[in-house]
Image: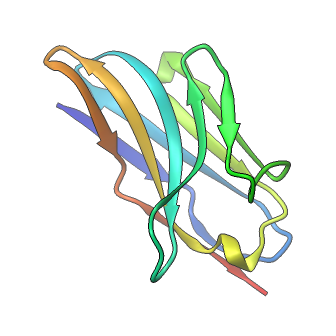
Amino acid sequence: QVQMVESGGGLVQAGGSLRLSCAASGSIVSINVMGWYRQAPGKQRESVARIVSGGSTNYADSVKGRFTISRDNARNTVYLQMNSLKPEDTAVYYCNAVVVSTTGVRNYWGQGTQVTVSS
């Protein structure tokens, strides 16, 4: 069993910054891909940023140059540094990981953390 615990959301004014963290724990052998998704009210969940174990990253066009994803492989933790936040960044943010565990390979999600950007 693997658990994903997120932290770091909150309320911030436009132009401000927040840092999200997500730690995976449990019967983990390795983690291939870690990423962040978000879902705004009335919209579908969308990919924000992803990082593979070797460190390569990709970002949604809407956050390029403002958000930075990173990971600490030793701690099985992924981070999302969000700068120059805009009201349209308001959403519930979910971390995601493709985990190789003792029982196989599976996709895991965090519980979600609310990010609200006021104008």
Q: How is the image coloured?
A: rainbow
Quadrant where the image shows the C terminus: bottom right
Query: x and y percent of residue 43 in the render?
Result: 48, 76
Total labels drawn: 0
Query: Residue at the location (79% across, 49% down)?
Result: 64
Image vertical order of residue 63 relative to residue 2, above or below: below
Viewer-closest of 101 and 19? 101
Quadrant where the image shows the N terminus: top left
Query: Residue at the location (30% across, 40% down)?
Result: 108
Query: x and y percent of residue 24 in the render?
Result: 38, 33
The answer to whether residue 66 is left or right of residue 70 is: right
**Residue at the left extreme, as displayed:** 103
Query: x and y percent of residue 45 in the render?
Result: 45, 63
The answer to whether residue 91 is left or right of residue 26 is: right
Query: x and y percent of residue 77 in the render?
Result: 50, 31
Image vertical order of residue 88 relative to residue 20, above or below: below
Viewer-closest of 44 and 83? 44
Query: Residue at the location (45% across, 69% down)?
Result: 44
Which of the 4 image quarters holds residue 102?
Answer: top left
Viewer-closest of 17 and 43? 43
Query: Residue at the location (29% across, 18% down)?
Result: 100
